[in-house]
Image: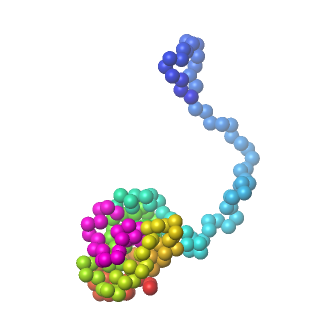
């Protein structure tokens, strides 16, 4: 460890540098009680554990960028829309094994009709019911997961342009409701 400058040094002292601990010849064994070694990682879909992926917190920087493009109707809370959109965007990003990008969020908002200035009233009723309160993840995590799970993998693999075209043809084909 480095010493402050006011600590006197003897001229014969040799400064030390890092040295690795001695190598162990025996094997390492997982002996801690919570170690998962025999079955591998838990099944992601079985426990509704979400969509794990790298650098997911970056999405919080992207959400304000698309905020001006959102068209909310009466009774929809921006916090709920952003939380649901983020869940879908993270699911899409993890599907490709990468960190989230702006296109993930754009696809999420497109398939739920939040970028449409005049969405179908049936879609508005459906999303109002599904998105209500999902920003309170402590109490509404299953509902948040249901929002993300309603967007199938085939929809998530679309580019933003393809998602917009498919939405214009019919939003029901993009969601599993």
Please indicate whether residue 96 sits to the left or right of residue 113 in the image. right
Q: Is residue 31 above or below residue 108?
A: above
Q: Specify the quadrant of the image occupied by residue 44.
A: bottom right
Residue 103 seen by the camera: yes
Which residue is located at x 32 percent, y 70 percent?
106
Residue 56 picture location, percent across and down: 44, 60
> Which quarter of the image is occupied by the C terminus?
bottom left
Q: Main structural element of the magenta stretch: helix, strand or loop?
A: helix
Please indicate whether residue 88 sits to the left or right of residue 7 in the image. left
Q: How many marks?
A: 0
Residue 156 picture location, percent across and down: 40, 75
Of all residues, the one furthest to the top in this rendering is 11
Q: Is residue 109 above or below residue 25?
A: below
Q: Nearer the viewer, residue 165 or 134?
A: 134
Which residue is located at x 52 percent, y 74 percent?
142
Residue 94 picture location, percent across and down: 46, 67
Over which residues does the magenta segment extend?
Answer: 63-85
Membership of 65 in magenta stretch: yes
Membership of 25 in magenta stretch: no
Residue 166 picture location, percent across and down: 32, 83
Residue 92 seen by the camera: no
């Amino acid at each position: 460890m480095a010493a402050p400058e006011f600590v006197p040094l003897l001229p014969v002292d040799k400064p030390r540098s890092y040295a690795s601990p001695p190598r162990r010849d025996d094997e390492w064994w997982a002996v801690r009680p919570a170690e998962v070694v025999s079955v591998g990682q838990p099944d992601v879909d079985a426990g509704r554990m979400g969509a794990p992926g790298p650098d997911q917190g970056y999405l919080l920087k992207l959400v304000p960028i698309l905020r001006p493009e959102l068209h909310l109707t009466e009774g929809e809370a921006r916090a709920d829309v952003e939380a649901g959109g983020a869940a879908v965007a993270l699911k899409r990003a993890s599907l490709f094994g990468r960190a989230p990008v702006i296109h993930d969020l754009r696809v999420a908002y497109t398939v739920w009709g939040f970028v449409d200035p005049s969405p179908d009233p049936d879609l508005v009723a459906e999303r109002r019911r599904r998105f209500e309160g999902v920003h309170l993840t402590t109490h509404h995590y299953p509902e948040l997961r249901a929002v993300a799970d309603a967007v199938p993998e085939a929809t998530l693999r679309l580019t933003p342009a393809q998602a917009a075209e498919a939405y214009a043809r019919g939003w029901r084909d993009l969601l599993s409701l």
